[in-house]
Image (cartoon, rainbow, N blue to C red):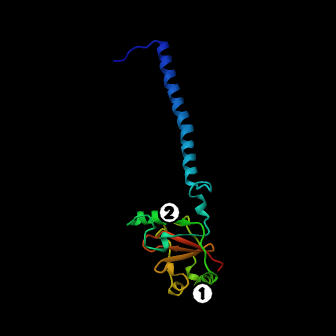
C-alpha cells in the first residue's frame, strides 16, 4: 500500500537520495584513482627502500653460500627457507679476487660467450631467488682451481657481472664484477 507524502517530505526524500548519490560518486571518483596510484607506487621499487640498493648491486657474496656448514653460533637451517635466511644474513657488499682468479674468470667468459645473457627480468642481488626461466650454466671444472668455493654451483653473466647461483635453492650467493 502506498502512502501519500506531502510535498515537503517528497523534497526531503529527493534531497537525501541526491546527496547520497553525490557522496558515493565523490568517494568513487577520489578513492579509485587514489587506490590505483598507491598500487602503482608500491610496484615501482624506490632506490631508497630496503631492497632498492640491491637492484643495482654490482658485487657481493654470501658466506653461507660458499659453505654448507652453518655459521658459527647458529643452528643448521634445513630446507629452502632456512637456507635463504642463511644466505641473506651472511651477505656482504664486497668480494675480493686475486688477480689470477679474476683473470681466470674473465678468460673463461671470453672463450664461452654462451654464458652471457642479454636481459635479466629480476633484481640481481645476493640472496635473490633466480626464476626457473633464467638459463644457468654449471660452474665449469676449469674454474674450480681458481674459485673452488663455487664447485657444483651454477652461474650466468649479465651487465658486466658473473652471478653465482646455488644449485639447490637457485639463490644468488655471489656477484663478481668482470671486465670481459
Please indicate whether residue 46 sits to the left or right of residue 135 in the image. right
Give the numbered dot on residue 89: 2
**Which callout, 1 or 2, points to the residue nearer the camera?**
2
Which residue appears at 61% of the width and 60% of the height?
53
Q: Is residue 93 above or below residue 40?
A: below
Q: Is residue 147 above or below residue 65?
A: below
Task: Give 35 or 163, whichever is nearer the viewer.
Answer: 163
Q: Which residue is mark 1?
A: 111
Q: Is residue 125 visible?
A: no
Which residue appears at 57% of the width and 42% of the height?
34
Disc 1 to disc 2, C-alpha distance? 35 Å
Quadrant of residue 96 within the rendered picture: bottom right
Label 1: how many Cα within 10 Å (few below 14, some 14–19, many 20+): few
Task: Give 74 or 85, whichever is nearer the viewer.
Answer: 74
Q: Position of residue 60 (x, y in %)?
A: 58, 69
Which residue appears at 60% of the width and 87% of the height?
111
Q: Is residue 141 visible?
A: yes
Amino acid at each position: 500500500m502506498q502512502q501519500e507524502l506531502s510535498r515537503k517530505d517528497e523534497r526531503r526524500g529527493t534531497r537525501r537520495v541526491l546527496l547520497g548519490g553525490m557522496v558515493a560518486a565523490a568517494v568513487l571518483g577520489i578513492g579509485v584513482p587514489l587506490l590505483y596510484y598507491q598500487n602503482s607506487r608500491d610496484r615501482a621499487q624506490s632506490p631508497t627502500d630496503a631492497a632498492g640498493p640491491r637492484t643495482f648491486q654490482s658485487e657481493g657474496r654470501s658466506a653461507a653460500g660458499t659453505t654448507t656448514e652453518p655459521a658459527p653460533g647458529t643452528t643448521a637451517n634445513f630446507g629452502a627457507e632456512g637456507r635463504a635466511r642463511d644466505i641473506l644474513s651472511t651477505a656482504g657488499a664486497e668480494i675480493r679476487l686475486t688477480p689470477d682468479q679474476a683473470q681466470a674468470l674473465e678468460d673463461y667468459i671470453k672463450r664461452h660467450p654462451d654464458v652471457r645473457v642479454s636481459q635479466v627480468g629480476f633484481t640481481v642481488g645476493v640472496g635473490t631467488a633466480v626464476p626457473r626461466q633464467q638459463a644457468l650454466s654449471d660452474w665449469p671444472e676449469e674454474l674450480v682451481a681458481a674459485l673452488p668455493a663455487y664447485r657444483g654451483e651454477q652461474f650466468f653473466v649479465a651487465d658486466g657481472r658473473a652471478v653465482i647461483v646455488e644449485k639447490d635453492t637457485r639463490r644468488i650467493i655471489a656477484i663478481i664484477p668482470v671486465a670481459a
